[in-house]
Every structure is written in C-alpha cells, then in structure tokens.
Amino acid sequence: MAGFLQLASLGLGLWLVRRALYVYKAIRNIRGIPVYISLIEPSSICSAFFPKGTWNPRITHAWDHQERYDEMGAEAILFVPLFFGVAVVHSGSPELNRQLYTDIKTWPKPARALNLNFMGENLLTLNGEDWRKHRKITAPAFDSQIYADVWKVTTNLYCQMMNSEAWKSGDQHYFDNFNDITTRLALLVIAACGFNMNVPWDGPFLREGFEEPLDSVIVRVCKVLLPRIVFPDWIWKAPIKGVRELQRSFLEMQRFLDLEIEAKRKELSLEKEHDTAESKNLFSRVVLASQTEGAKGLTHEEIRGNLFIYLFAGHETTAHTLVTALALLAAYQDEQERVYRHIMSVAGDRDMEYADYSDLTPVLHCFYEALRLYPLATNSLRIAAEDTSITAPGLTKDGNNTVFIGKGFEVIVDMVGSTRNARNFPDPIAFKPRRWESADTAVMENFMAFSAGPRLCLGRKFSTVESVCFLSNVLRDWRFDAKLEEGETATLWLERVMKPDIGVTLKIDNTPLLVTRR
C-alpha cells in the first residue's frame, strides 16, 4: 500500500508540474490580453459535470456574463484552465473575429472542432483544398431560381396554415409554444426546396419504408446532436437501451439520406441518357454537380454529410430566428406597428411575390436584429497555424490593441460578445431594427451571425428570403402580443420567456405568443 501511495504521489506531482509548465507556456505565448484563471476549460465537456461558478464558468459564460469584457477592460480574454483543458482566447471583438473568419489559411478550424461529420465530411467541417472542393460543388446550387422557389413554397405553406383548423377557428389564438409553428414551416420549406418533398402543412411527413414521420426523426436528431458530437463513436455502440434509442434516430436519418442519394443518382443517370437532366432543387443540384465533376466530385458519404448539414442548418437557424423576432415584436409594439404599416404600403392586400423582397427591408431588419440579439451559433473555434500578431480596436486593456498568439493556440469567436459589442452596436441589448437602416459597411461586415469571408454561410439568403416572406404575411394578417402576468411589463416578460438553452446552438424553447386577427 505504501508503495502504491508513493507512486500515486509521484504521478500527481509530475502531473501538477506538467500543468504548471503548460499554464506558464500559455501565458507566455499569448500576450497582450487579460488572463482569466479557471479550473476547467469552459468549452470542455468536462465542465458540464461540475457546478457552474467563478472557477468553472462553462461555455454558457458568453451569455451568463456578457459584462465580463467590460469588467476586464478588453474585448479579448485568455481563459487558462489550471487542471483540465487547453488555454483558449475568447474574442468579443468583431474586427478580430472577422479576421479569424476571412484569413482561413492562418486561422483554420482545429481538429477537435471538426465534429459534425458523423454523417460524412461536409463543407462546414473541412479545411484547405477539401473545403474548396466541397464549396465549388455546392455553392452553385444556391441561385436566384432557388430563392424564387423558397418564396413560392413559403407562401403556399402559409396559406395552408391559415386554412388549418388551428387558425380558422377564431380571431384570437394563444400558442403556448410558437416554436412548433416555425419549426414545422422551416422543415417543410427545406424539404420542398432542398429535397423536392412537398408535404402539406397538416399532412404526414412519411416516406416509404419508414415507420415514423421523418420530421419526428429530424427534430429528435437535432435535439440530441450535442451528446452525439461530444462523445466518441464507441459509446454509441454500447448495449444500453437509452444509447441505442438515440443511435436509432441517427441510423434512420442516415438510411433516409442514403436511399434519397441512390434514387437521385439513378434518376439523373436516366435523364442524362435522354438528355433531360436538370437541377430541380438543392439536393439534385449537388448530386448532378458532383456527377459532372467525375473523379473530382463528392463521394456518397460526402454528399450525405452536406445534405445532413442542409437539413440541420437549413431549418434550425430560420425556425429559431423567426420565433425570436416575433417574440421581440410582441414586446416592442411600436416596432411591430411600424413594420406592419410598411408591409401594407408595399403590398396592401395583394399576394406578395419574390420581387417584393427588396422592398421589404424593414422586415429583414427585424430578422437581423433578432439574430443579433440571439445568435444561433454562440461560438466557433479557430487555431493559429503560425505565430501571429493581430491588431483590432478595443482589443487590449492598455490601448495597444495588438496581441500575440503563438502557433497551435486556439481562439473562440464569441458570437454573443461580438453581436452585442457596444462599440459596434450602441445600446446593444435593446431591440432596434432601425439601427440597420443606417448601418455602414463596417457594421455590416462585423455582423457575422452567418459567419464571414470565404466561409460565409451558403444558406444565408435562403434563410432571409423564407423569413421575410413568412414574417411579411403573418404580420400583415395578425398582431402578436405577449400574454403578461399580473403586474408584469413587456420587458419583464422578455426576461422570463427569452431564456436561451445553449448547446450545439442557442435556442429559445417554448415561446408563448398571443395572436389576434387584424
């Protein structure tokens, strides 16, 4: 026993020395910004197993302590864990974050960030030449024809929704979870425009060979993405009932995508023989473009990986921001009325068309402002490929505004800190859609809720077209209100209701809204 204790003491001592040397190296190799000492790396999964507090801020600190940059007098903070994890710079500087996004050679994604590729490698997870290949094949799928289709499909689904029993039954309705509405809409739009699956608003999302509706599978997969991402693959083969149930959802999703890809390949090959092959939606465009590239095209697994990202990102971002925008407009009635009057001035009672999109910028500004206040992606990881110095305004405490980051160290783009940066967005916690009317080029460049630079999200306009179409229609026909408790103000209602759940994404769950026919 004595020998074991001595060996354990020696091991502990060596480990402590190693950690002390690592902490010293981190502080020496990342210079010019304040240091925050924690016990565990905030972005580590291990931090979730210990109580949240000063010594264990967790990844949610970006939301929980938005004032931390002001308190430490800098827009970048070096988090150094004493016992577990790696030192990481957290940046709330829009200018620094833009550099991280645009200089993809100096600031690639680190290996540990490439964790959404369990369905296959995809545009979101790759670096270098592999990323360029995927971008070349997938980017052309997003064009004006797709956006016109998005508007048409969204309008059609809105009309079906209005004819459903839930909306026809009266002139006022209370939805205790309006998220269900926006999630349904976003899923059906991406199904139609992405996969040519035209599912009615109240119809079953069924596919031959599948026992349960595919929308149930997709929603369940999205809800369990975090554990699927952070835990190693071998865990998902464990003979545990709960684990098997989670894995079953992913396998069903994979089987659906595999069958769709094979069917689409055969369909396009047959059409090609008769010289009738054409790109009808995102899915067929990606498959057709990949076939056209021949040996340089995407593999079956890579197509599947990209299609899964389309499904996930193609509805999560839009559904989240739509319900957030409506909740904010319910609390800010003057803004809702202003936007309503603008919609009426553009379209009156006629059916709105895609050509109206550019005239409905106040609606788009509501979308931007909701996404600014509640960005879906709260953080994004980058690693220094070489020793580098970065300069950005407001970056450091002493006003030098230049920091040195050694090769191999990581920086987290803190999207909450960036989009709520008071220097770029005065009165940052207020909902002010009109701030976008006078936003200069620099402010627009620093709004990176859809990423920035070469890795700007391909689906950005897909999402904004869908959102502007839905918001314009629903705000013209209905007034949205907050159902206040006794003595509660709209501000207090927002504080009570708009509490985000931060996992793979930031989401507001169970948003209650009262709607009244205009």
Image: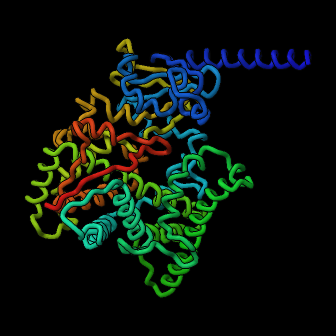
Q: Quarter-wise, where is residue 75 in the image? A: top left
Q: Residue furthest front?
A: 486
x, y percent for residue 315: 41, 58
The quadrant in which the C terminus is found is: bottom left
x, y percent for residue 273: 51, 85
Residue at the spot 50% in from the left edge and 70% down from the top edge: 213
The quadrant in which the N terminus is found is: top right
Residue at the spot 63% in from the left edge and 62% down from the top edge: 248
x, y percent for residue 141: 41, 64
x, y percent for residue 63: 41, 33
Q: Is residue 288 left or right of residue 162?
A: right
Figure check: 106 above or below 168: above
Q: Residue furthest bottom?
A: 274
Is there any visible trace of residue 314 in the rendered image? yes
Residue at the spot 49% in from the left edge and 17% down from the top edge: 35
Residue 448 versus residue 275: which sits nearer the camera? 448
Is there any visible trace of residue 132 in the rendered image? no
Q: Is residue 340 left or right of residue 167?
A: left
Figure check: 191 above or below 388: below
Figure check: 97 above or below 114: above
How many discs appear? 0
Residue at the spot 39% in from the left edge and 29% down from the top edge: 92
